[in-house]
Image (cartoon, rainbow, N blue to C red):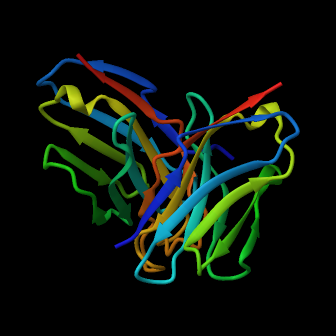
Amino acid sequence: AQSVTQLGSHVSVSEGALVLLRCNYSSSVPPYLFWYVQYPNQGLQLLLKYTSAATLVKGINGFEAEFKKSETSFHLTKPSAHMSDAAEYFCAVGAGGGGATNKLIFGTGTLLAVQP
Amino acid sequence: KAGVTQTPRYLIKTRGQQVTLSCSPISGHRSVSWYQQTPGQGLQFLFEYFSETQRNKGNFPGRFSGRQFSNSRSEMNVSTLELGDSALYLCASSRGEGALSEKLFFGSGTQLSVL
């Protein structure tokens, strides 16, 4: 069975500082991993996804994540935080292991605050 | 191109009532999935449809049901509402059968409040 754990329900950074949001996964098959962002009163928007190609995945808005199999991690980073990055971030793993399903298992989310 | 449209945006019901939520996927998308989002349980998978067939169902009681129409629009129904059903219900669509290599597009959700 697949699962993800997000470490830290709240993270606060200063504008211009490094953003690091942590996600560890558990999967019995090679995982499909995702990061989504949710702004207040909105749905989820895909930031990036890992599907067994390059281990360093670049996404939108300057975010990237590195897949580390040895650490079962898929941490999200951004070199310099912007005020507009304040949102809730969700890590997710595909439940089907690549089969014909879009079922995702989400982490509990990390609320990112950016201080001026 | 219009995104995933969910209606209504907000809904208030009382315990024991039933509710129907609607989701119109992006034009050309044939796969629709539903998620429930609550502060306590987070995001949980409800069900998934492709070409009018339910392919997957999450761990929810039978009061939760759904369907997909030939135009790919989907509805979910919750009968005998309970206070714990208060949540944001999100719909997502993708073009094909999934396999997670495709991009999922989420709607803004329907916020259901059960009083």
Picture quadrant of residue A91: bottom right
- Closer-to-camera residue (B91/B37): B37
* Quarter of the rendering occupied by the C terminus of chain B: top left
Q: Is B59 left or right of A1, judged from the image as shown?
A: left
Please state the horizontal and vertical placement of residue A115, each as a whole percent of the image: 77, 27
Please state the horizontal and vertical placement of residue A16, each as a whole percent of the image: 88, 39
Residue at 27%, 58% (x, y): give it. B58
- Reply above or below: A42 against A37: above
Residue at 69%, 82% (x, y): give it. A53
- Closer-to-camera residue (A62/A114): A114
- Reply above or below: A90 against B55: above
Please state the horizontal and vertical placement of residue B48, each as a whole percent of the image: 36, 60
Q: Is A63 left or right of B52, judged from the image as shown?
A: right
Q: Is A63 left or right of A50, judged from the image as shown?
A: right
Tally of marks = 0
- Closer-to-camera residue (B42/B3): B42
- Reply above or below: A37 against A76: above
- Closer-to-camera residue (B74/A28): A28
Please state the horizontal and vertical placement of residue A103, each as a whole percent of the image: 41, 64
